[in-house]
Image (cartoon, grey):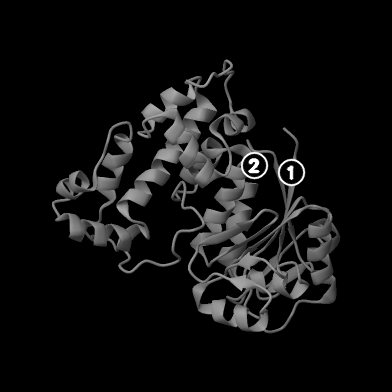
Amino acid sequence: MVEHAVAVLALPRVVPLDLGIPASIFGEHLDLPYRLTMCGPEPEVATTTGFTVRVPGTLADARRADTLIVPGYTSPADDPSREVLDTITQVYRAGGRVVSICSGVFALAAAGVLDGRRATTHWSRTAELAARYPRITVDPRVLYVDEDRLLTSAGVSAGIDLCLHLIRRDHGAAAANRVARKVVAAPHRDGGQTQFIESPVVAGDTSLSGTRAWALANLDRRVSVPELAHRAAMSPRTFARRFVAETGRTPLQWLLHARIDRARELLESSTLSVAQIAGRAGLGTAINLRAHFRNLVGTTPTAYRRAFRTVAVPSERKP
């Protein structure tokens, strides 16, 4: 596999957690062909928590990246230096991906690469982003926005979701899920999911995680919302309300995304036909799978398999 250069650009008063997310996800999993470089405008960069971090890479290193990631920093009212902004635009104009986590989006906005595009940031900063940069369509609700080579995320844990999304784009669902297991993260929260939920589950709370685990183990069969509610010992109305509060999705939306995720893994790792995979994922027919797959993934099952398969698959004929 061709090595992919990832540069993380630490700006002054960088948020340590935002900095650590891409460092861990792209730097610690050596079975994936990423070469990570931590970069900065200076050899030492101050963080928001009072300590400094030493970065071995320079802006010149950042300009050579295939993917440039800008973590959050706490002085977005003060635009980064012209040299930093030029670095962002050079990577983008050269065909690279430019990614922000949380308030790192303000650097991308100041560089002008987001003009005419959708973007997001932490929900507490979306109004400021929209006011300062009216040419950007700011979506305050979502976890992350994928605009092909321009990707932006909300705060903190949404940065994990976006980095896993990049791995999923590059190397498929199985690779992303493997990394998610290593960092003990949710394997797939798509970008359209809401940034925050009404009732976060705390330790000792009676959550629906067990019901969701059962559903994942039974995706090959028809699973109804009343059945899930019965397993959770709730009325369907209460169950649906609690489910949205915990996940940000209705039960049917969650089930559909889980089925597509199962189909992606089977397309990558098995020799099953598209029709067989549709059955295993609980989507019924190949026609149904193709329709939902194109809607949610943006391509066909066969094209996805061709890009990410890890086993030899015989030629498929439509049933």
Contact (Cβ within 8 Å) of mark 2 with mark 1? yes
Q: Given the image, on which type of amino acid does mark 1 rest?
A: His
Question: Which residue occupies 64% across, 42% down?
Answer: 170
Q: Given the image, on which type of amino acid does mark 2 rest?
A: Asp
Residue at image mark 2 = 170
Residue 14 picture location, percent across and down: 65, 71
Quadrant of res 215: top left
**In-image side of 182 versus 100 (left or right):** left
Pointer 2 local density, CA inside 10 Å: few below 14, some 14–19, many at least 20:
some
**In-image side of 121 versus 239 (left or right):** right
Give the residue furthest to the top: 314
Residue 251 picture location, percent across and down: 31, 51
Residue 39 picture location, percent across and down: 76, 61
Give the label on residue 98, or none.
Answer: none
Q: In the rendered view, would you say 75 is above or below 284?
A: below
Res. 14 visible in picture: no
Q: Quadrant of the N terminus?
A: top right
Foreground residue among 89 and 56? 89
Question: Which residue occupies 56% across, 35% down?
Answer: 300
**In-image side of 192 versus 88 (left or right):** left
**In-image side of 18 versus 264 (left or right):** right
Foreground residue among 160 and 39? 160
Foreground residue among 246 and 69? 246
Give the label on residue 4, or none.
Answer: 1
